[in-house]
Image (cartoon, rainbow, N blue to C red):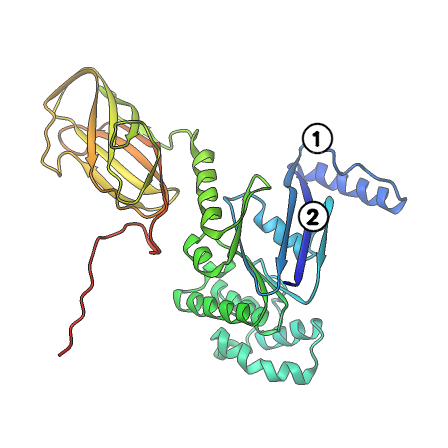
Amino acid sequence: MSYKLIEAENIGKKFCRDLKRSLRYGIQDLGAGLIGRNMGHDQLRKDEFWALQNVSFTLSRGETLGLIGHNGAGKTTLLRILNGLIRPDRGSIQVRGRMQALIALGAGFNPVLTGRENILVNASILGFSKREINERFDQIVEFSGIEEFIDMPVRSYSSGMVVRLGFSIASHMEPDILLVDEVLSVGDLAFRTKSQVRIQELKDAGVAIILVSHNLHTISHVCSRAIALEKGEIIYDGDTERAIDAYRTSLMKSHRNIEDALRAGTGELRINAVDLLDSSKKPENEFNIGDSVIIRIHYEAIKPVENPVFNIAIHVLNGQQVTGLRTDTDGVTLGTLTGTGYVDVHVPHLNLLPNIYTLDGIVFHDDGFTFYDRVNKIAHLKIRGGLDVNGIAYIPHTWQASSN
């Protein structure tokens, strides 16, 4: 039977959007607590909102739990509650064992003290003796990779150096529970790789780990379980890949009604909609890797337009462009367009890896530069399932070995 290190039941936390009103509420609650009155923490007051609501979960020894959700979903708030930095407004938490946390850049460091002094202070607070600190000191410094700066004040460190030292201290102080927020993304690739190896070593040693990251590849490979949060509530708790799928669905839902980030052009030809169709020409927004897809661009010509250039740009949601499909680069001319109609782009094998993607619809004059119309994020596309491959696109390939 696994030993539970964290038991959280019906956790709720609310915040106030107005700073002055928040301070007033805080004073009222403090005064009520001093005289033993209940201020009714289940009720929202003016400008308050639930950052977390009805959050329940357990974490066992040796388990690695991923926390995923878009910005504002409640991930960092939950970590701060677990670490005791803030108190929940309702619910209960039981934490067993020594906890170490890396949940904010520079948290727990005195910027005036040197790196060496901060190591000694952090270890002393955790109850380590001078002998135990000395035994771990060289390992901490070596892992951090900042040996030549260890006697400089922390305020002179770069953000990457602060993260290196913070993670090194947290992971070498024999925690029972380790909380790691997105701050690890500040480090360089070599350090992130070393950190993932260290997390696996801690997991093998029975340490329970909670990891927050927007890097779904890291969550998939490191975490044995994941929780997806949406607007402060758990929408899935369990299998990591299913949690990631729930998170992607949540992302697509939250962006579905986004206003155009840019609409520009001369206006003689406008894009009314972009539809995604499956192989049966039925509207669909979710596909598997390698599916056949038709991208249908609906247009309206205010007056006859000669040889317009149609372009579909595909982006990772809130990220880089994956590709662009243009009629002119493909040697296609459309002649004169009048009235309303549509242009189809046939993609026989959509080899995008699982993620949420957005489509921009663009129509150029025949000079290839001047817009008739451009609409950003006019359609969304979800790729599900797939292969254990990191990146954006899958390139079909084969392997062959030979010996001399």
Task: Tell us which disc is closer to us: 2 or 1.
Answer: 2
Is 166 situated left or right of 7 in this image?
Answer: left
Of residue 228 and residue 62, the one placed in the foreground of this image is 62
- Residue 114 shows in this picture: no
Residue occupying image coordinates x 50% and y 51%: 239
Q: In the rendered view of the protein, which quadrant contains the N terminus?
A: bottom right
**Residue designated by label 2:** 9
Residue occupying image coordinates x 70% and y 63%: 96
Q: Quadrant of residue 30?
A: top right
Give x and y (percent) for residue 299.
24, 21
- Residue 269 shows in this picture: yes
Q: In the rendered view of the protein, which quadrant contains the C terminus?
A: bottom left
Residue type for callout 2: Glu
Q: In which quarter of the image is residue 58?
A: bottom right
Give x and y (percent) for residue 195.
47, 68
**Element carrying mark 2:** strand
Residue 82 lies, with reference to residue 349, above or below; the image says: below
Is 86 situated left or right of 193 in this image?
Answer: right
**Residue designated by label 1:** 46
**Element carrying mark 1:** loop
Is 83 situated left or right of 183 in this image?
Answer: right
Q: Residues within 10 Å of mark 1 (few under 14, many from 20)?
A: few
Q: Quadrant of residue 73?
A: top right
Nearest to N terminus: mark 2 or mark 1: 2
Give x and y (percent) for residue 164.
50, 68
The Cα–Cα distance between marks 2 and 1, rounded to whole angstroms, is 26 Å
Residue occupying image coordinates x 73% and y 44%: 90
